[in-house]
Image (tube, rainbow, N blue to C red):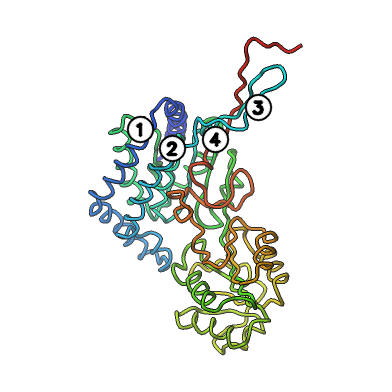
């Protein structure tokens, strides 16, 4: 496609998205929920056809040499589709914040002033690999009455195209504007840069993918961007930890699904923890096939631990590799996390109330986990139905982003003829 044609296509998509976002404000909540439930039905009834389209992407991914973790993220398995269906039902059941009033106050002159929750408007999602993002993002945007423009990665083009066709059908069957969800039908990377220039029509960009994608979007966008560069998540096992909790938490945080952003990348062991207890955690990880990189003190725990270097602490492995750090108490553990962490998710395993509170207060992270796995840092697990992404920014949202996070507010001032003197 020539650049002039592509520019015309992207401009048209953005303009239609803006119009649809305004039209959504007049739609009933019943129709919006109906569309979400219709999509859940279509995912179930069209599962075989979706998996056939997904197979094309998986076969192309294997030819390109995608890693096992990346192929896992790309796969529309029965389990993934079931999770997507459940997420749609949960989002449909949520109470929308749109139209609610809060922070109401009455001034001495009788003016009634309040804030009203409103949609952000048009949201562009630029993402890689995971086709479930197509459905999650569309569902949360629709529930919060935002129009969404989706630009998935080339590696999931067939899967994303098929999912968007079904979602558009669901919108039409529910008397909603079809342009409330649009998919950019090209793998041409120039389309992304063109999309990022449409600041008059698009209100927010959310990139989901590798650090290079997110940095490129943040650097080139004329539209505000909510970022999540990487997920360097930590688990600190204190000398006061219950080992019956510590070992399963450490193993689950790394092994349950290593290719996702809330998987642990560095395990911090308290030097006050008994040597045998430290070895038991290490052995459990090695038994699960995890390759370990450690500081000098960690290396004495097993001959299988490879000595780490300074770069190791900044690595987001996204596979069965893990750093082991030794800390002389909780203060040193917190310092390490705040130095090398990505403000995503960090966990402490301890029975000390003082340590729980210190960790919760002092670690600079979007999600603090206490005596539980980092893998719970997820919109679905937080009761949000699903998520549109995880923000490691502090403005406008932080952590897993759901329906509430895709709203802003307008001031509403009610009077009875007052004029300012």
Please name the residue shown 46% across and 49% down the image: 384
From the top left corner, tell me how far across and down residue 315 is, in percent: 59, 68
Helix, strand or loop at disc 3?
strand
Does residue 8 lie above or below 39 as drawn?
Answer: above
Q: Earlier in the sequence, mark 4 or mark 1?
A: 1
**Residues at discs 3 and 2 in contact (Cβ within 8 Å):** no
Return the residue at label 2: 6
**Residues at discs 3 and 1 in contact (Cβ within 8 Å):** no
Give the number of the disc on residue 105. Answer: 3
Helix, strand or loop at disc 1?
helix
Q: Earlier in the sequence, mark 3 or mark 2?
A: 2
Please name the residue shown 61% across and 18% down the image: 414
Drawn side of residue 16 relative to residue 377, left or right: left
Return the residue at label 4: 203
Q: Earlier in the sequence, mark 2 or mark 1?
A: 2
Toward the right, the furthest residue is 421
From the viewer's side, name the closer residue of 247 and 133: 247
Q: Residues within 10 Å of mark 1 (few under 14, many from 20)?
A: few
């Amino acid at each position: 496609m020539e650049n002039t044609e592509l520019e015309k296509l992207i401009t048209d998509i953005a303009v239609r998205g803006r119009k649809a976002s305004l039209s959504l404000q007049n739609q009933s909540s019943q129709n919006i929920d109906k569309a979400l439930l219709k999509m859940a039905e279509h995912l179930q009834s069209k599962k075989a056809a979706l998996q056939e389209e997904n197979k094309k992407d998986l076969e192309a991914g294997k030819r390109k040499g995608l890693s096992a973790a990346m192929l896992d993220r790309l796969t529309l398995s029965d389990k993934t589709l079931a999770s997507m269906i459940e997420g749609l039902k949960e989002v449909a059941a949520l109470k929308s914040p749109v139209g609610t009033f809060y922070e109401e106050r009455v001034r001495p002159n009788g003016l009634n002033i309040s804030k009203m929750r409103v949609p952000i408007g048009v949201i562009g999602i630029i993402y890689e690999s995971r086709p479930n993002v197509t459905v999650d993002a569309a569902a949360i945007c629709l529930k919060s009455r935002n129009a969404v423009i989706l630009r998935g990665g080339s590696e999931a083009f067939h899967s994303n195209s098929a999912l968007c066709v079904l979602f558009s059908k669901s919108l039409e069957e529910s008397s909603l504007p079809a342009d409330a969800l649009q998919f950019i039908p090209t793998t041409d990377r120039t389309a992304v840069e063109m999309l990022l220039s449409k600041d008059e029509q698009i209100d927010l960009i959310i990139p989901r993918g590798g650090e290079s994608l997110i940095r490129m979007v943040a650097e080139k966008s004329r539209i505000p961007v909510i970022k999540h560069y990487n997920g360097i998540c930590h688990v600190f096992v204190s000398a006061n930890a219950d080992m019956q909790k510590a070992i399963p938490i450490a193993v689950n945080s790394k092994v349950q699904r290593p290719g996702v952003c809330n998987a642990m990348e560095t395990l911090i062991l308290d030097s006050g923890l008994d040597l045998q207890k430290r070895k038991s955690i290490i052995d459990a990880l090695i038994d699960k096939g995890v390759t370990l990189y450690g500081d000098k003190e960690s290396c004495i725990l097993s001959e299988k631990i490879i000595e780490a270097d300074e770069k190791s602490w900044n690595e987001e492995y996204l596979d069965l590799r893990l750093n082991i750090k030794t800390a002389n108490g909780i203060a040193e553990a917190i310092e390490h996390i705040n130095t090398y962490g990505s403000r995503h998710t960090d966990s402490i395993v301890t029975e000390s109330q003082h340590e729980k509170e210190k960790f919760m207060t002092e670690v600079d992270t979007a999600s603090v986990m206490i005596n539980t796995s980092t893998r719970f840092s997820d919109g679905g697990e937080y009761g949000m139905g699903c998520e549109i992404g995880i923000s490691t920014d502090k403005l406008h949202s932080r952590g897993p982003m759901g329906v509430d996070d895709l709203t802003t507010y307008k001031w509403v001032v009610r009077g009875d003829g007052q004029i300012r003197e």
